[in-house]
Image (tube, helix red, strand yellow):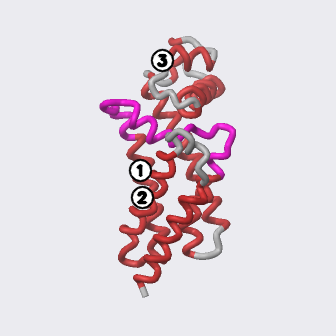
Amino acid sequence: MGTRDSTRNRLLDATDEVVFAGGDTTAPVDRILERAGVSPATLYRAYGSKEELVAAALDRRHREWLDAWDAAVARAATDRGRLLAVFDALEEFEARADGARWCAFLGTAAGYAELPPVLAAAVRQDSDSLRARLQTLAEPVAGPRASDLAEAVLLVVSGHLAMRLRPGAAGAPVSTAREVGSVLVGHAARARR
């Protein structure tokens, strides 16, 4: 017998709340089950393991992030604006009611001494898509140095997310990261001329 979509969604929502929004990557599965209002048998029937459940929640969050980023890119009027739209998307994503304490993917990676393969794949998917999208968006701005610019912007994005963990910096505005990114993009554009 399969698991209802509504039950699967309750498990995903509970994982999002406890693990990502709550910032507790080592939360026992019992807390997730209690929040979702389901039995262990339901979890294992639906996902097979806690790690599979977390990977599914990461996949859902990844799709939602890409949708937010796509919308920000679509609103931008210039090549530079489309590249810097990652910061607009970050700001919007962080303001959501289900916003995480910091990056759900970085948090998952940091929560394990050695990532289980299913979680490593989810984290890698996020990293790879960030890198590939940034490189594509950087090409009209930086030409053959698009890969370097994409890596630099990715470093700024990751640094901003990590700064959210420092005491007193949780409210650090995305605008600061965007300013740094803007300097990098401007430098790359000038170097291309």
Residue labelled with disc 2: 131
Contact between marks 2 and 3 (CB within 8 A): the answer is no
Q: Mark 2 to mark 3: distance in Å?
A: 32 Å
Task: State which region is magenta.
Answer: 92-121
Q: Is residue 52 shown in magenta?
A: no
**Residue 8 can be seen, yes or no:** no
The answer to whether 46 appears left or right of 147 in the picture is: right
Contact between marks 2 and 1 (CB within 8 A): the answer is yes
Q: Secondary structure at mark 3?
A: loop
Q: Mark 3 to mark 1: distance in Å?
A: 26 Å
Crowd around label 3: few <14 · some 14–19 · many ≥20 (10 Å): few
The answer to whether 20 appears left or right of 95 in the picture is: left
Picture coordinates of residue 146, whole percent (x, y): 40, 71
Residue labelled with disc 1: 127
Q: Residue at x 64, y 37 (%)?
A: 98
Q: Residue at x 62, y 40 (%)?
A: 99
Residue labelled with disc 3: 28
User: Which quadrant would residue 187 be assigned to in this image?
Assistant: bottom left
Where does the C terminus fall, quadrant-wise?
A: bottom left
User: Which quadrant would residue 17 be assigned to in this image?
Assistant: top right
